[in-house]
Amino acid sequence: MPLPPLPGRPRLGRAPLPPLLLLLLLVSPARPISFQLPGKARKCLREEIHRDTLVTGEYEISAPPGSSAGPSANLKITDSAGHILYAKEDATKGKFAFTTEDYDMFEACFESKLPVGTGRMPDQLVTLDMKHGVEAKNYEEIAKVEKLKPLEVELRRLEDLSESIVNDFAYMKKREEEMRDTNESTNTRVLYFSIFSMCCLIGLATWQVFYLRRFFKAKKLIE
């Protein structure tokens, strides 16, 4: 028999998180990506982004430690069709921004221009901080332009985040409907093809029976 709780001491348990706190946890800033770029090498980062989405980014390329030459690399951002959205030769540090026109796969490529050399050449350090959607908006500027209070700015941010989540779910639902329609169409085609194949086999078998019957009658093997 379980013991009753002591008076004056509440029982511990897991209370459900309120929706506002859940949204605040989701609005965690994205961390920049850092990687090594060897000489004469090319590295690319790909990401799928929805249509009509603002994309901003900052990059910095650091020279190899102990190297007399500065950093030397090219940056190019393209979509799946090969359209160049941003390009920079001899990039060292900068920012970029663009708005997507359609849901697509976008690619950011860094290509080192440093020679490989005969010995061990230190790699360049590339740091990329790429944001899109709610993360890319500058709410400080919005607050200055619209003269919003801190609480109003946070509510605007949560509103945009909620809208982004709703749009993501709507897109996932649309994709699920398209996949279901594709599966149903494929199943229908397979069914029709199976019926056609069975009809062909039945027709071929019937023709073989009549042909063999005539052949055996011609040879007087059957009456």
Image (cartoon, rainbow, N blue to C red):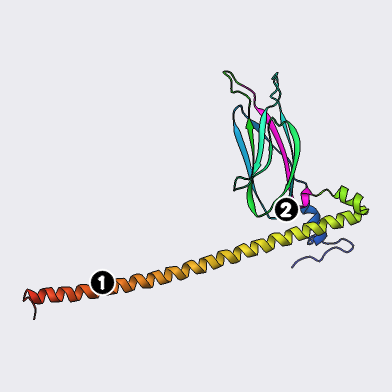
Which residue is denoted by mark 1 in the rendering? 204
Query: In the image, is 173 to the left or to the right of 96?
Result: left
Which percent across, then down, holds residue 118? Answer: 56, 18
Residue 16 falls left or right of residue 194: right
In depth, the one of 80 and 38 nearer the eye is 80
- For the point 29% across and 71% down, the residue is 201
SS label for mark 2: loop
Location of residue 115 with respect to 186 vertically, above or below = above
| Residue 122 part of the magenta-drawn span | yes
Q: Amino acid at mark 2?
A: Thr
In the picture, the quarter occupied by the C terminus is: bottom left
Q: Secondary structure at mark 1?
A: helix
Q: Earlier in the sequence, mark 2 or mark 1?
A: 2
Task: Please provide percent x and percent y for residue 40.
Answer: 59, 28
Q: Position of residue 85 (x, y in %)?
A: 68, 44
Which residues are drawn in magenta? 121-136
Instruction: Name the foreground residue: 77 vs 10.
Output: 77
What amino acid type is highlighted by mark number 1? Leu
Quarter of image, res 156: bottom right
Q: Is residue 51 magenta?
A: no
Badge 2: residue crowd in 10 Å (few <14, some 14–19, many ≥20) = some
In percent of width and height, residue 189 lies at 44, 69
Q: Nearer the viewer, residue 120 or 217?
A: 217
The label shown at residue 53 is 2
